[in-house]
Image: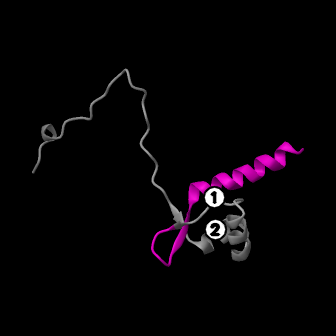
Amino acid sequence: MPKLEDHPAPHFDEAQPYEAPKARVKFLRRADVETMTGIPRATIYEMVNKGRFPRPVHITPRIVCWVEAEVAAWQASRIAERDAHL
């Protein structure tokens, strides 16, 4: 069994700014995107084609998903746009 000493701690350079570990990417299937946004399939694809909604990621030749953080950012932008017009 390896000992703790066999795995040195990562190098820490005080001159470099701390960078938090990258968050894991969560993919959403189309049905999840529809539920999350309340937008039907045809409208999602229409908006994607017009550049008004995040583009899906092809995870296989026949399966596409959306990045959850991108959909959430789109939602936040819609809310911000609404609030800017108050």
What numbered label is drawn on residue 71? 1
* Colour setting: one colour
Kindly report the distance in space between the C-alpha atoms of the residues bearing marks 2 and 1.
Answer: 8 Å
Q: Quadrant of the C terminus?
A: top right
Instruction: Single out the residue that lies furthest toward the left.
Output: 1
Q: Where is residue 63 drawn, in percent x and y?
A: 51, 75
User: According to the image, label 2 marks what residue?
Assistant: 33
SS assignment at label 1: helix
**Quarter-of-image position of residue 37:** bottom right
Q: Is residue 18 above or below residue 68?
A: above
CA neighbours of label 2 inside 10 A, class few (<14), some (14 to 19), many (20+)? many
Would you say 78 lies left or right of 24 here?
right
Would you say 12 lies left or right of 27 here?
left
Q: Earlier in the sequence, mark 2 or mark 1?
A: 2
Would you say 22 lies left or right of 71 here?
left
Residue type at mark 2: give it: Val
**Quarter-of-image position of residue 18:** top left
Q: Residue at x 67, y 70 (%)?
A: 35
What numbered label is drawn on residue 31? none
Residue type at mark 1: give it: Val
Q: Where is residue 50 drawn, in percent x and y?
A: 72, 63
Q: Where is residue 53 drawn, in percent x and y?
A: 68, 60
Q: Are marks 2 and 1 in contact (CB under 8 Å)?
A: yes
User: Magenta part of the protein: which range?
Assistant: 58-86
Depth check: give the residue in front, 5 or 28. Answer: 28
Q: Residue at x 27, y 35 (%)?
A: 10
Q: Is residue 82 above or below residue 71?
A: above
CA neighbours of label 1 inside 10 A, class few (<14), some (14 to 19), many (20+)? some
68 is within the stretch colored magenta: yes
Q: Residue at x 46, y 49 (%)?
A: 23
